[in-house]
Image (cartoon, rainbow, N blue to C red):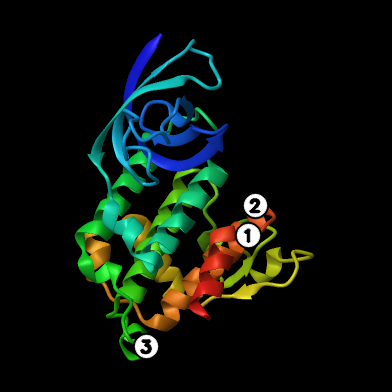
Amino acid sequence: MLRRTEGIVLRTVLFGEADLIVTYLTPDAGLLKVFAKSPRKIKSRFGSSLEPLTHAKISFWGKEDSQLPRLTQSDIIRPFQSLRDDLNCFLRVSEIIEITLCFIPERDVNRRVYSLLLDTLHTIENNPALLRQGPPEEVSRGNAGAAGKNLVVSSYKVKFLDLVGFAPKLDACGRCGKNGYNFYLSQGAILCEACADNAGSPIKLSAALARFYHHLLTWDTAKIQRIKPADKILTELLCLINTHIKYVLAKPLRTEAFSQHTNTR
């Protein structure tokens, strides 16, 4: 059966000498793996449409329950070339892609996640400031490209975790609803003193972080682009979210470690 949809290339894996297994995020088939015959040959009909991050219209052939249908056509809608050309930007976007691949089961349809990813890629590409690494003094004021990229990536992580059901609960105690600012990784939530027995050591959060987190969950992308959070709050948020993701996955993100290594060189 021939099926058509659109998708964003998240990953490609070599198969044999000239073939690829391509993983797409699609709006109506979820996370989809397809077999692409000979795309690495010079005269391949797929051209550059299988490059990572490429948004394309695709056709694939196979039985409805086929685990690896065959890709028959791929036409580029938007290549997102600039996101691949800038190393710092590509590393940030790669974090987004890795998180998406880690949390979403294959064929689990989630149109809101697809829209969030596509919107985030458009946001980064359409704002040149987000593609530049500014000097340290500008980053600390929240005005440089690095801070912008951190904000966009943080926003994606927060919204994505909420959509897939793994968001940390920061608005109140996860058991009784009382106010508090002690976050427990083992519970994925804030716990008040009365409810925190044997929950381990907490991560102390600021009231400003709790408010900022709520804003990221509720504000759209256009509004988020206009805010300039203090570097301290953004750093606190990134540390919390990355630690939470690491705990849930029981492993660190490979792209996060690679980014840190690259930035220290």
102 on left or right of 56: right
Q: Mark 2 — residue?
A: 249
Residue for point 57% across, 32% down: 16
Residue 46 is situated, as x and y percent measured from the top left of the image, at: 33, 31
3 or 1: mark nearer the eye:
3
The answer to whether residue 27 is above or below residue 96 is above
| Disc 3 crowd, CA 10 A, few/some/many (<14, 14-19, 20+) | few
Residue where numbered disc 3 is placed: 136
Task: Residue type at mark 3: give it.
Answer: Pro
> Hey, which quadrant is residue 192 in on the image?
bottom right
Q: Are marks 2 and 1 in contact (CB under 8 Å)?
A: yes
Q: Which mark is residue 246?
A: 1
Q: Check the image and name the residue furthest to the bottom.
A: 137
Which residue occupies 43% across, 78% down? 233
Q: Residue 145: x and y, percent? A: 30, 74
For this rendering, which residue is in front, 138 or 243? 138
Are circles 3 and 2 on residues that touch, CB within 8 Å?
A: no
Mark 2 packing: few (<14 Cα in 10 Å), some, or many (20+)?
few
